[in-house]
Image (cartoon, helix red, strand yellow):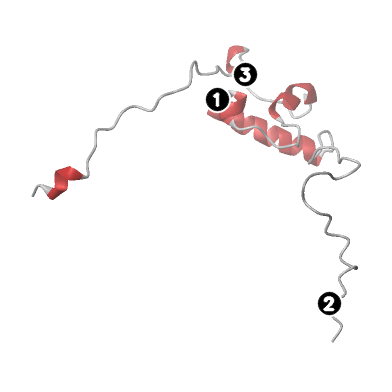
Amino acid sequence: MAGKTEGRRKRTAPLTGGRRKSCFFCKSKVDEIDYKNIAELRRYISEKGKIRSRRISGACRRHQRQVAVAVKRAREMALLPYVAEGREERGGGRGDRGDRGDRGDRGER
């Protein structure tokens, strides 16, 4: 029966990286988050337009759900964009996929 104890190891508590953020809405005693308050909601949206997670935003579970619903309602009412503003020119190391006409070996059978 020595095989059962070989695979076990002692568990340790997960290390947290510092102080936990306190919820802004709990501190200011906000009961309901208004979707029309765009200036407040912009803090919870990334540059690309995504809703920030609880881990990043520091909101509690209850208020994070309310933020998500408020952001979705504001998007539906066209108060907030669904995505970030598009850039003029796409850059990067990837090749442009729109220029496929120069390949002469395909489709010439």
As measured in the structure, the alpha-carbon distance from the residue carrying label 2 to the one carrying label 3 is: 62 Å
User: Is 22 left, or right, of 13 in this rendering?
Assistant: right
Looking at the rendered structure, the kind of residue marked 3 is Phe
Query: Residue lying furthest left in this view?
Result: 1
Q: Residues within 10 Å of mark 2 (few under 14, many from 20)?
A: few
Q: In front: 11, or 89?
A: 89
Residue 30: give its label. none
Q: Residues within 10 Å of mark 1 (few under 14, many from 20)?
A: some
Sequence-wise first label, 2 or 3: 3
Q: Which residue is mark 2?
A: 105
Mark 1–mark 3 CB contact (< 8 Å): yes
As measured in the structure, the alpha-carbon distance from the residue carrying label 1 to the one carrying label 2 is: 58 Å
Residue 24: quarter of image: top right
Residue 45: quarter of image: top right
Sequence-wise first label, 1 or 3: 3
Residue 25: give its label. 3
Residue 60: give its label. 1
| Residue at screen point 91% across, 41% down | 88
Q: Position of residue 68 (x, y in %)?
A: 66, 35
User: Is 40 left, or right, of 85 in this rendering?
Assistant: left
As measured in the structure, the alpha-carbon distance from the residue carrying label 1 to the one carrying label 3 is: 8 Å
User: Is 76 left, or right, of 68 in this rendering?
Assistant: right
Q: In front: 106, or 23?
A: 106
Q: Position of residue 91 (x, y in %)?
A: 83, 44
Does residue 65 sit above or below 39 in this rendering?
Answer: below
User: Is 66 left, or right, of 81 in this rendering?
Assistant: left
Looking at the rendered structure, the kind of residue marked 2 is Asp
SS at mark 3?
A: helix
SS at mark 2?
A: loop
Looking at the rendered structure, the kind of residue marked 1 is Cys
